[in-house]
Amino acid sequence: MSCKYGFKVTEIGLIPDEWAVAKVGDFVDIKHGYAFKGKFFTEEENENVVLTPGNFHVGGGFKDDKFKFTTEDYPVDYILKENDIVVTMTDLSKKGDTLGYAAKIPRSRKRKYLHNQRLGLLKFNSDSISSDFLHWVLRTKRYNWFVVGSATGSTVKHTSPSRIKLYNFACPIDVAEQQAVADILSTLDDKIELNRQMNETLEQIAQAIFKHWFIDFEFPDENGEPYRSNGGEMVDSELGEIPPGWEVGRIEDIAQIFDSKRIPLSKREREKRRGKFPYYGATSIMDYIDDYIFDGTFTLMAEDGSVIDNNSYPVLQYVWGKFWVNNHTHVLQGKKPFSTEYLYLLLT
């Protein structure tokens, strides 16, 4: 297979001959959002959704979850339109997991998505860039590193429109080619999102079955009927009634803990060791580096008490393959005859 392009050396490395290096600020201004007042926020759903960085996936993209609603009488010019592109100006994770990343506003007949001060709205002033292509540029890890590297704040990380506009990147000179690249990435993203939703559904099914069998004791009896509700024998224990032959134990009885093998790496160290192996933190993959310290299937449980899920439990990750882990998550594996999958579902 032959390559269409030759390559040239630029300040950001090798790029195709027919591409150019540009800055975000060559194409857009970034508008600040409205300072919605906290006293008007409500948990009761209505049509007015105040978007926050919590509505972004790590790596960018719109997350249809954790909405904040308001009853405030706000200026109408802060209502976002379908396909508007917004970027996060703050990040509460202390690591910059979503800082600067972009998302497109989806279509909605039921909601008004509102532009608050924690987000910046891209206002295009040039027709020499595909908005879809720039959206993908602002979802790259290289861009995130650039933004996080200059972020201010320790507890809450901040960036600014002027900083984002300084980011330089390579792009095709031909707008049609930019759009073709963006279309391919969007198709792949749609497939990734569909797989994510399927995995989420399958995990919910697994959790429901686990609870039905091992918490409610409704596993199939010898006739294939739910055990407890069909007269299955139960005996007393310190935790209440359990089937005969079952025991009450501790997590340490069924789990191996590998915390002593964890090795944290600073951002600077990781930048020197770029590679293909995931580097996990308390809630997600933080980076990719050139080596691994674990190989297999494990359950990771966030160690920091402030890192919790929607049910106020420590964040769990089910991971497999070769990877590295920092010191903010426990590294657990099922102790035979208990599987790591059983351990993961027990902790969810």
Image (tube, rainbow, N blue to C red):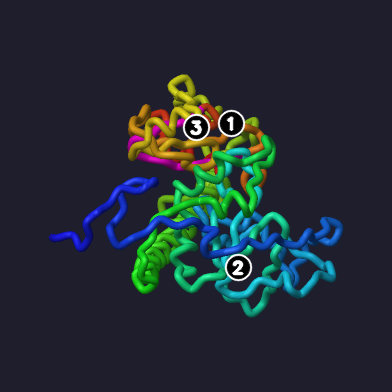
Please tell me whether residue 317 belongs to the stretch shown in magenta: yes
The spot of residue 169 in percent (x, y) is: 43, 54
Tag 1 or tag 2, which sits nearer the N-term?
2
Q: In this rendering, would 9 be left or right of 216?
A: left
Query: Bounds of the magenta span?
Result: 314-326
Which residue lies under the disc numbered 2?
A: 123
**Residue at the spot x=51%, y=25% of the render?**
252
Looking at the image, residue 72 sits to the left or right of residue 305; the answer is right
Residue drawn at (35%, 64%) of the image: 172
18 with respect to 152 (left or right): left
Identify residue for label 3: 267
Dot 3 and dot 1 residues touching (CB under 8 Å): no
Name the foreground residue: 189 vs 304. 189
Query: Which one is nearer the viewer's eye here, 215 or 7?
Result: 7
Picture coordinates of residue 4, whole percent (x, y): 20, 63
Identify the residue at horizontal 45%, vertical 47% (top origin).
141
Element class at badge 3: helix
The location of residue 171, given as percent across then percent down, is 38, 60
Q: Is residue 184 above or below residue 227?
A: below
Q: Which is more toward the observer, 69 or 216?
A: 69
Q: Position of residue 108 (x, y in %)?
A: 61, 76
Disc number at residue 303? 1
Name the magenta segment's main secondary structure. strand
Q: CA distance from mark 3 to mark 1?
A: 20 Å
